[in-house]
Amino acid sequence: MTGPTFGTRDDTQRVGLTGAVRRAVPISRRESSSWRPVALVVECLVMAVAAIVTATLVPPLGDTGRLTVTFVLLGFVLQVAMLPTYERLRSLLPTRRAVIIGGLAMLGSATVFEVPPRQLRATAIVVAVTVLTGLAVRIVRSRTQTRSTTLLVGDRVAVSHLVSLWGPQPDVHIAGVCLAETDDDGTPLTDTIMDITVVGALPDVPVVARRLGVDQVVVAPGPVLTAYDVRRLSWALEDSDVELAVAAEVHGAVPTRIVPRLLGRRLLLSVRPTRPPAPLAAIKWIVDRVAAVVLLVLVAPVLGMLWLVVKWDSPGPGIFRQARAGQHGTTFTMYKLRTMTLDAPAMQADLAGKNEGDGPLFKMRNDPRVTRVGRVLRATSLDELPQLVNVIKGDMSLIGPRPALPTETHEYDDWIWRRLTVKPGMTGLWQVSGRSRLAWNEAVRLDLDYVDNVTVSGELSIAARTIGAVVRRDGAC
């Protein structure tokens, strides 16, 4: 794992952007971005209307309250105006700053001007509704926004790595590649890199970015590019609404774990530890057990009825017990509603040739061992309800990696074993991202991403997405 590195060739020898910058004109605003000012105006108007409507429904604000709300709206607009063009519609910084402005204004009103508590409460309600309305507009717009178009810049090896990484991603569209290489040795530059068209060289980046109307230019670090090349490229794009980004070689870390800092005039990316803070771990421990107890009490009647249905549908116990690998590889007994026939383990050897899974997993879309009721339970994920008992016992967590079979862990290397450093979960990134239809490597990557980046917001996001995945039966098998 390394940070972005660039070559250190002499300035007179590298393929720089001197000529491109000298003759380049400011990149004009693209047609695709002409809606951005309109969208910002609409957003501000929606927030203003929300403030006016709320103010009419709550007790009188008074002059101080009206002034506070005005400060919040103006502060939001000013913060948006100070952001780069490409950042104005997606950044949450204006919203956070608006909350700070409103909070400071109300604190000053209470301590300096001695505003009555009734007016302060009314002001707080109006400010909260105004800010939350703006936040909701931004969230809705981010969900409906089309995927961003990207122009890659770098040498063949570095660019090929990014193309292989981003090619399958539905939210990334690579419009072309500008190669930062020369043909001094007489070898012509390639026309494509992994089916992505090479549209120019390093000096062509500003013109190509304008012609293709891309949202961002991504520089792939490598020995050919220098820090001076990137700096000159930022000069060439500074009058446009095209974002310039450098792809850092820090895998599996969310932005909150990356802290930029300077050391001897060199930009470093400091990577924070993966282990969650002790308070967060304690909160997760408490929430797991309390929530599991509450949920188990609520679903107990349903669980009892399903237990009877399973026993009626096929001979055998209603609850299926199986050894699974827990935290640090320790074995525990996991509980599920039985979805297969009693002779399912013995039949697996005969079905090995029909295995549709990769890696150590055994998967069949139409597994003959699954009972009639079992297919319904699997499709709705109701078979996993007894795992609430495992959560209460401390063997599992509500959210975590998929609980693996002990036989699967025998094939793990040190890299995959990392997923066993936390408790397995009833749900997790693997489940909300496709479950059974995921390839083994992709499932492992999601589990490792979760283990290395446990956050409160991430836990809440997975919990919310689990509801949608269960309703859609996404990846159920």
Image (tube, grey):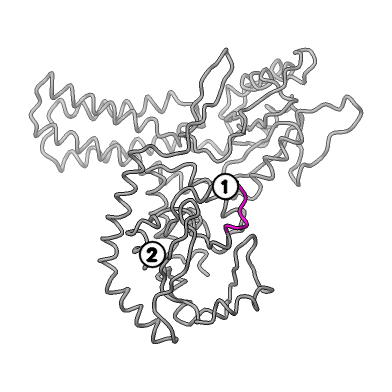
Residue 452 x %, y %: 49, 42
The stretch drawn in magenta includes residue 126: no
Select label 2 or label 1 by which is in front. Answer: 2
Q: Which residue, given by chain and number where applicable, does mark 2 sit on?
A: 387
User: Does dot 2 land on a helix, a strand or a loop?
Assistant: helix
Can you tell which mark lies on residue 126? Answer: none
Q: Which circle's residue, 2 or 1, is located before the other in the chain?
A: 1
Q: Residue furthest right?
A: 186
Left or right: residue 255 versus residue 350 is left
| Mark 2 touches mark 1? (CB < 8 Å) | no
Instruction: Tell me where the magenta segment starts and ends, as one range.
Output: 409-417
Q: Quadrant of residue 207?
A: top right
- Assess disc 2: are there few (<14), some (14-19) or many (≥20) residues with their C-alpha within 10 Å of its C-alpha: many
Residue 223 x %, y %: 74, 26
Quick check: 37 above or below 348? above
Residue type of the residue flagged with mark 2: Gln
The stretch drawn in magenta includes residue 411: yes
Q: Could you give the CA–CA distance between mark 2 and mark 1, rounded to whole angstroms?
A: 34 Å
Q: Quadrant of residue 393?
A: bottom left
Q: Which residue, given by chain and number where applicable, does mark 1 sit on?
A: 171
Q: Residue at x 18, y 25 (%)?
A: 107
Residue 420 x %, y %: 50, 51
Residue 377 x %, y %: 43, 74
